[in-house]
Amino acid sequence: MISPLIEQWQRQRAQEKKAQKKQVARLKRQKGKKLDEQANDLHEEVFSEINCLDCANCCTSIPPMLNRTDINRIAKHLGMKVGQFESEYLRMDEDGDMVMKTTPCPFLLPDHACLIYEHRPRACREYPHTDQSTFSQHLRLHATNAQYCPAVFHILKRMENPVI
Ligand code: SF4
Ligand code: SF4
């Protein structure tokens, strides 16, 4: 059964878009350790209620960025030459970063597992940047990410209405 949190996100994300943008702008004034600790706790809480295998929306809709270490590691894992891997799977985006050429990601399997899970890019490991004291560093991304990731959406909602 799909998580009620994912269903709620599907129903409400469009109508909450403006409010969450304003919320993130307000959070800029609280940036720092305390905010990161709160976000980390909410990250644990929300991800205990959402199974990424029921979602995969990030892998379906956002092409991840790959750094040089990612590219070398994944090419080696696939038994491909780096140049061959790059031309088959990657493109340069408007900021000059290497990203997956296509969405959904070519390594996303039908059951939403990742074919290269142990070797996946750092960007995939760290998404959605809400744990381990990284929330404040990526503040400007969260309003946008809430439109793509149900977990970010609910972390922001619970920040707004903390259960005490
Ligand atoms: S590499 Fe794996 S985790 Fe990253 S976007 Fe592709 S399927 Fe998802
Ligand atoms: S969009 Fe968020 S909840 Fe969905 S699979 Fe990605 S990280 Fe998990």
Image (tube, rainbow, N blue to C red):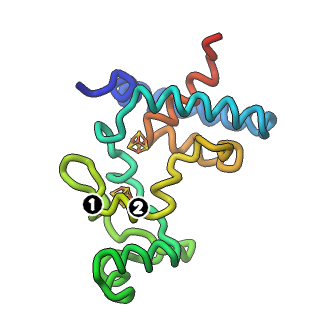
Q: Quadrant of ligand 1?
A: bottom left
Foreground mark, 2 or 1?
Answer: 1
**Is residue 139 found left or right of 91 in the rendered image?**
right
Quadrant assignment, res 38: top right
Q: Which residue lies most toward the left here? A: 110
> Residue at the location (44% across, 80% down)?
72
- The type of residue carrying mark 1 is Leu
- The residue pinned by badge 2 equals 63
**Tag 2 secondary structure:** loop
Q: Nearer the viewer, residue 41 or 101?
A: 41
Residue 42: x %, y % from top left: 58, 28
Taking the image as shown, residue 36 lies to the left or right of residue 6, namely: right
Q: Which residue is mark 1?
A: 115
Q: Residue 153 location, x and y as percent?
A: 50, 32
Q: Quadrant of the N terminus?
A: top left
Point out which mark residue 54 bears: none
Residue count near mark 1 (Cα–Cα under 10 Å), binned few <14, some 14–19, many ≥20: few
At label 2, the amino acid type is: Pro
Vertical position of residue 140 compared to residue 36: above or below: below
The residue located at (27%, 57%) in the rendering is: 108
Screen quadrant of the C terminus = top right
Can residue 62 be seen here? The reply is yes
Q: Is residue 32 left or right of residue 9?
A: right
Above or below 34: residue 111: below
Residue 88 at x, y = what percent? 29, 80
Residue 35 located left or right of residue 127: right
